[in-house]
Image (cartoon, coloured by chain):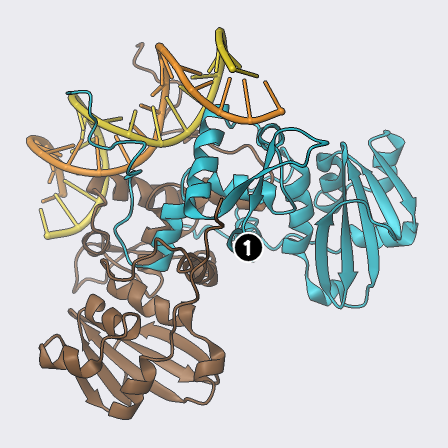
Chain colours: A cyan, B brown, C yellow, D orange
Amino acid sequence: MESQKITDSKNGPSRRRYEDACGTAHALDLIGERWALLVMRELMLGPKRFSDIRADLPGISANVLTQRLESLEEAGIVTRQRLDPPASGQVYALTEWGHQARPIMGALGRWATRSPGHDPGQHFSAVSLMLSFQAMNQPSLSKDIRAVVGFRVGRESFFARLADGMVDVQRGAAPDADVTFTGAPPTIAAAVYGGVPLAALERDGLLAVEGDRALAERFITLFPLPPKALKPAR
Amino acid sequence: MESQKITDSKNGPSRRRYEDACGTAHALDLIGERWALLVMRELMLGPKRFSDIRADLPGISANVLTQRLESLEEAGIVTRQRLDPPASGQVYALTEWGHQARPIMGALGRWATRSPGHDPGQHFSAVSLMLSFQAMNQPSLSKDIRAVVGFRVGRESFFARLADGMVDVQRGAAPDADVTFTGAPPTIAAAVYGGVPLAALERDGLLAVEGDRALAERFITLFPLPPKALKPAR
DNA sequence: CGGCATCCGGGAAGATACTG
DNA sequence: CAGTATCTTCCCGGATGCCG
């Protein structure tokens, strides 16, 4: 009898909420918990299995991932899908509404790179690297490029389609890639955000570039990081 | 002696971080803690004192507000400013970089209002109400309006400048307001987001409208909430 | 009053081990 | 592979009290 908790976890997930009508506050009720936004990020380019999400979010525990997926499903941001017979198990996918958060995450990421504390040299998941191209794109730099750039990273493939100053990123093999990068996410990040020459990475066997080399050299210059914000001397 | 903690709170605020190069993850390191974004929201329209922030964020404890302001100052998002002699004490203000998060908060808020769980009838701070007009503006509805709408809420005044389909919100008395609303934030929200007729609110003494009445009636139709997202039947 | 330190209770996050 | 179970750690929130 006395085992009944005040907050029944099954019935009313009355976890801490901001009792606030502001949309921003409600957004935090939905996706403000730790890891929630990063779980969404990992699903932005297509459905994933539990284990794959977990593998790409080092530091998250199975425990917490289960909870976040439940919350997000409850909120209508994520759906659980059974895989077709050939494969087994299930995957998690964003709903249409969940996908609408993509430009917001992009803007948030672009904003945060102005932080003096931001270090692009740490762990990079394949999905977040690909999304970063879209987020950091500056139309003025890419407006006269029309090309398809492929990426092979791990077992997965992605491609970025550049046209009219827009970068569109998708998962899958590019049927018509003009150039293809093969390497780990931090390696590609080193070229794009760290200014490390392609030749150096190739020499060390970390990166392979196939196809239009000039395009590859151009591509890695398209995403300059914004200037750091200055902390006002107090 | 053994009182030395592993995470020295004074020196290295090595609190839980995502060790992730992705900008979005870094954003969460900066502003992902509970209340952080709402503290920023309260400063978006100008500096505030500690107590005023606290009063407009019901539920936050002095304790936590102190911590958040420290973190945000540490990150370079907030500055502490001494008030000029006539007044006493100090205020907190956003840095230029902090202000750049404004459109992101707007987009986040607009996105979250699609949640079936969003209820615009709860507590509304004056600042968040004003910001919501900017966030929820749809240029197609407001493109042929050029006007200044004033608001008196509590001891504070704000005004919204509508022109060319844009809504710009500022704190302060409008020198040239075409119409002025006087009332509590939830009351104005009831008119704008709840569809409650102005006349009904005026009759109950909750709201006063001075100036161009037709503009007032028009104004409250400019911010329709987006359609709710459907939770896919599973 | 404004701002910060300290103590305490509850609950969320994290790590590890284990199960279908 | 996809989670549960359990235990520990630490953050959040409330109360109190100090200090200018």
Q: Examine the image and state in which quarter residue B32 appears.
A: top left
Residue hosting label 1? A96
Is there any visible trace of residue B226 in the rendered image? yes
Asked whether residue A117 is in view, the answer is no
Q: State the image coordinates of residue B61 (x, y, percent, origin top left).
A: 21, 42
Question: Which is nearer the eye, B226 or B137?
Answer: B226
Residue at 21% over, 66% down? B186
The x, y position of residue B140, in whole percent, is 49, 81
The reply, left or right, for residue B182 in relation to residue A181 is left
Q: How many marks?
A: 1
Q: Quadrant of residue A68?
A: top left
Q: Using residue B193 as the reference point, say whether residue A55 is left or right of it.
A: right
**Quadrant hosting residue B182:** bottom left
Q: Is residue B55 above or below residue B130?
A: above
Q: In the image, what residue occupies the spot 41% across and 89% down?
A: B145
Residue A128: percent from left, percent from top: 63, 43
Determine whether the residue tagged by mark 1 lies in a helix, strand or loop: helix
Subunit of mark 1?
Answer: A
Residue B88 against residue A115 in the figure, above or below: below
Q: How packed is label 1: few (under 14 Cα within 10 Å), some, or many (20 or more)?
A: some
In the rendered view, would you say B189 is above or below A151?
Answer: below
In the picture as drawn, the residue positioned furthest to the front comes out as A85
Residue B176 location in percent, x, y?
A: 29, 89
From the viewer's perspective, tell me whether residue A205 is left or right of residue B127.
Answer: right
Residue found 47% across the figure and 61% down from its top: B107
Q: Depth check: give the residue in front, B107 or B45.
A: B107
Give the position of the N terminus of chain B as an image quadrant.
Answer: top left
- Which amino acid is tagged 1? Glu
